[in-house]
């Protein structure tokens, strides 16, 4: 019987873009002997997660593997790529070497690592998986703006904008703050909704927060018709629900687009 130790699969959360938000535990793993794996959207493409690590000053080790996860909603296509990635990682783990998968944001929040680890465990339930927590994009955005997501007895909800404008409108009446992720396909419709509800002044658009390409836009109407990056979100306050305790809207900590000097 082969008693060779199998490697561990480690999901290393890196935060949304600022290398300074990499945790000490993730940093420790990245400086260790683990084989690096990282997601790309297409073969030979760039990796946002890998870029975070590079900007932290770490070079790409000799033992590294890009794993392709295409941007598609086709379940059959996704399942095929998940299986291919899992088989690639599993082969490395069988050699006894740990694999650290680089994750932008946090591994527990809409992360590709969820599907990778699940697929690897489906191939081999004996594989040990370690998940390293990180900073989600919406926490980093709120901190960057100097605004709380919630205080006192306020409520907030986090959802992909893909649930549709009707759902967003319903939740606007139920929560004091909404965090809308993956807004790219519905941005124009969301802007129209916020305008109709009188909430344009209480929303902030943030893109690639913590990176050199970071963008913060308060004047949401300016974004109408613009193609934005996938790595973007909207923070929306609903001051009508706060009994007068939160009338600030979404103010800036530093100067943002759409505001005077």
Image (cartoon, grey):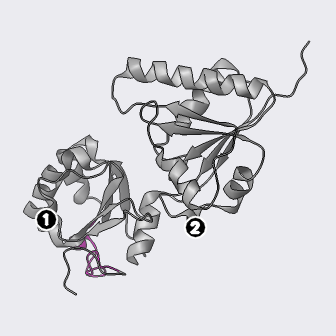
SS assignment at label 2: helix
The residue shown at (32%, 57%) is 233
* Residue on which disc 1 sits: 222
Instruction: Measure the alpha-carbon separation of dots 2 and 1.
Output: 31 Å
Q: Residues within 10 Å of mark 2 (few under 14, many from 20)?
A: few
Where is residue 155? Give x, y as percent.
Answer: 37, 64
Magenta-highlighted stretch: main secondary structure? loop
226 and 238: which one is in front? 226
Q: Position of residue 256 (x, y in %)?
A: 28, 76
Q: Is residue 166 above or below residue 4?
A: below
Residue furthest top as drawn? 1
Residue 188: image x %, image y %? 14, 52
Name the residue rendered at 20%, 80% in the picture: 259
**Which element carries disc 1, helix, strand or loop?**
helix
Residue 226's quadrant in the figure?
A: bottom left
Q: Identify the residue at image location x=40%, y=78%.
A: 146
Q: Quadrant where the C terminus lies?
A: bottom left
Q: Describe residue 115's horizontal placement relative to residue 97 as left or right.
A: left
Find the magenta span and give its range.
Answer: 236-252
Is 250 colored magenta in this rendering?
yes
- Is residue 179 shown in magenta? no
- Residue 174 appears left or right of 35: left
- To which residue does mark 2 refer? 20
Crowd tier of the residue under label 1, counting other residues whose Cα lies within 10 Å: few below 14, some 14–19, many 20 or above: few
């Amino acid at each position: 019987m082969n008693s060779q130790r199998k490697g561990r699969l480690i999901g290393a959360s890196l935060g949304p873009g600022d290398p300074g938000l990499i945790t000490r535990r993730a940093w420790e793993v990245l400086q260790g002997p683990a084989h690096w794996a990282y997601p790309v959207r297409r073969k030979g493409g760039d990796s946002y997660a890998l870029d975070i690590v590079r900007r932290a000053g770490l070079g790409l080790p000799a033992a590294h593997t890009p794993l392709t996860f295409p941007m598609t909603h086709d379940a059959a296509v996704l399942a095929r790529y998940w299986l291919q990635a899992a088989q690639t990682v599993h082969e490395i783990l069988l050699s006894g070497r740990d694999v650290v998968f680089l994750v932008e944001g946090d591994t527990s929040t809409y992360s590709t690592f969820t599907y990778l680890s699940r697929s690897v465990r489906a191939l081999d339930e004996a594989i040990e998986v370690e998940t390293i927590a990180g900073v989600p994009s919406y926490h980093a955005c709120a901190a960057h703006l100097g605004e709380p997501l919630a205080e006192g007895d306020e409520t907030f909800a986090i959802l992909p904008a893909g649930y549709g404008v009707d759902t967003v409108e319903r939740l606007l009446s139920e929560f004091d703050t909404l965090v809308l992720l993956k807004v790219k396909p519905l941005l124009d419709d969301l802007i129209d909704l916020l305008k109709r509800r009188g909430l344009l002044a209480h929303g902030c658009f943030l893109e690639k927060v913590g990176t050199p390409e970071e963008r913060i836009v308060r004047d949401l109407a300016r974004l109408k018709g613009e193609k934005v990056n996938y790595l973007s979100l909207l923070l929306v306050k609903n001051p009508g629900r706060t009994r007068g305790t939160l009338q600030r809207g979404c103010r800036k900590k530093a100067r943002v687009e759409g505001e005077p000097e």
